[in-house]
Amino acid sequence: MSHITALDTTGALVLEDAIGKLEHRGIAVLMSGLRADHRRRLAAIGALPVGGEGSIFAHTPEAIAHARACLPDPVKAISR
C-alpha cells in the first residue's frame, strides 16, 4: 500500500469489505507499506486484518517471506 497517497473513508470501507470477504473464506490477509495515517484510519473502523500487527509489514518482501513461511511443507504433508 506504499503507493497509495490518500485513503478516504470510502476507500477504507472498500478495503474493510474486501478483507472481511477474504478472511471469511479462510484466506489470510497481509498488508505492506501501510502509512501511519492509513493504519489509524483502518484501525478506527476495524478494517485491519485479523492477525493485527502480525499481518502488517513495512515492505512487501517481508510479507511474502511471512506468507511462504506459513505454507505447509509439501514433503512433510505427503509423508504423513
Image (cartoon, rainbow, N blue to C red):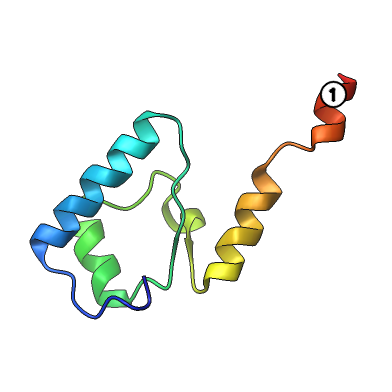
The residue that appears at 44% across and 48% down in the rendered structure is 29
Crowd around label 1: few <14 · some 14–19 · many ≥20 (10 Å): few
Report the residue marked by disc 1: 78
Which of the image's four quarters has the N terminus?
Answer: bottom left
Q: Position of residue 15 (x, y in %)?
A: 24, 53
Q: On the picture, is 23 further left or further right than 80?
A: left
Q: Position of residue 28 (x, y in %)?
A: 48, 42
Residue 50 x/y as whole percent: 39, 43
Three-letter amino acid code at the position of disc 1: Ile
Left or right of 8 on screen, residue 3: right
Residue shown at 18%/58% (left/top)? 12
**Nearer to us in this view, 69 or 75:** 75
Labels in figure, total: 1
Horizontal arrangement in the rendering, residue 58 relative to residue 64 (left or right): left
Q: Does any portion of residue 45 appear in the rendered image?
A: no
Q: What is the quadrant of residue 21 in the picture?
A: top left
Q: Going by the picture, which residue comes out furthest to the top?
A: 80
- The image quadrant where one finds the C terminus is top right
Residue depicted at x 19% and y 65%: 41
Whether residue 24 is situated above or below residue 7 in the rendered picture: above
The answer to whether residue 36 of the structure is visible from this angle is yes
Indicate whether 80 appears above or below 34: above
- Identify the element where label 1 is drawn: helix
Residue drawn 48% across the image and 54% down it = 55
